[in-house]
Amino acid sequence: MRPVGILGTGAYLPEKVLTNRDLEKMVDTTDEWIVSRTGIRERRIAAPDQASSDLAVEAARQALEHAGLTAEEIDLIIVATVTPDMAFPATACLVQDRLGAKKAATFDLSAACTGFLYGITTAAQFIATGVYRYALVIGVECLSRILNWEDRNTCVLFGDGAGAAVLGPVEEGYGFLSFELGGDGSGGEQLKLPAGGSRLPASEETVKNKLHTVSMAGREVFKFAVRVIGHCTEEALKKVGMTKDDIDFLIPHQANIRIIDSAIKRFGLTEDKVVINLDRYGNMSSASIPVALNEAVRDGRIKKGDTLVLCGFGGGLTWGAAVMKWARD
Ligand code: ACO
């Protein structure tokens, strides 16, 4: 198997900032409640004329430039999202067209907040086996479009954004070392967008009852997240004979600072070893991990040879982790 790693990263965050103070004027909440329960201070909101593909294209262009590749060289584009521009064509097709990535195979992947982990795991198999050479994996969400802005339980938690990574062959000993993916459909009810699919097509009734917005059992999801963030990180490390002491950087899904703190405690990490951006962006579902990765790469925190653990969890229920030795200078 050919060693596979990340050759370049990129991100795009919409300009509009929605602060907790802004939310105080919209629903019965306070900055103090949101910060103490979640760690979130502000989030980005896509402009009315922006859809997920627009955010994705910006992040992808950056990642390609960072990798020193042109769009024509990309063999595969995977877009992980629960907020595609439309049910079909796939957002990956729209992105391919805008980038001019003419030879790329394209598909969307739905694994909620674990989408980026599922995406890089899938893309890496194609490259490791020699089927493809370069893949673009994008996590993108316009969650603001599927939130009930009258529901304080959910609308304060999420934000819009896109993160991208270009995957390709790397030198021996670097790149992805292990993957751990999981799912538990019995927990699907805990986090879902009830209507708009074949079960409950859009109707006056579904619109009236706000069934096109996120429904979440917060406490249950919280307990699940605390359980899996530790478990799947440990499983991914175990697969390559590593322990928590080998972690240089943990890049977790950015859902809630208390969930991340549980991992920091469990693994005895210091905060400088954990990449956190939820205070500025909230939970961007599949975009959270690649945006955080891009930040830590671009500001020079992550260096060649560092051991990274990426860990995600979310709707499905789904979870995943990847261990990698950073391959870029
Ligand atoms: N402002 C003020 N009060 C609020 C707000 C708000 N924005 N939201 C909820 N409350 C109230 C609730 O109504 C409840 O009031 P009640 O006791 O009178 O009914 C009270 O606060 C406490 O609610 P809890 O659910 O106990 O609060 P908790 O400490 O669990 O925090 C939270 C809620 C932040 C949603 C937490 O459960 C959580 O983070 N869960 C995980 C959510 C998550 O991360 N989801 C996504 C992960 S997976 C993925 O990313 C898709």
Image (cartoon, rainbow, N blue to C red):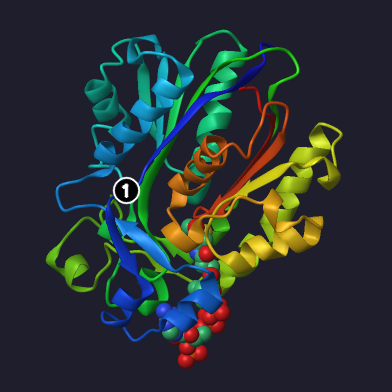
Mark 1 vs ligand 1: CB below 8 Å: no
Q: Which residue is mark 1?
A: 83
Q: Quadrant of the N terminus?
A: top right
Q: Is residue 137 left or right of residue 72?
A: right
Taking depth in this image into account, of 175 and 215 the one nearest to the observer is 175
Q: Residue at 31% of width from left, 61% of height from top?
A: 17
Number of dots carrying numbers = 1
| Residue 98 horizontal/vertical position (percent) | 22, 24
Asked whether 196 or 251 is in front, the reply is 251
Residue at 37 percent across and 74 percent down: it is: 20
Residue 188 visible from this viewpoint: no
- Which residue lies at the image location 53% right of the left edge and 69% below the top edge? 39
Residue 118's image quarter? top right
Q: Quadrant of residue 178?
A: top right
Q: Amino acid at mark 1?
A: Thr
* Vertical order, 239 against 173 (above or below): below
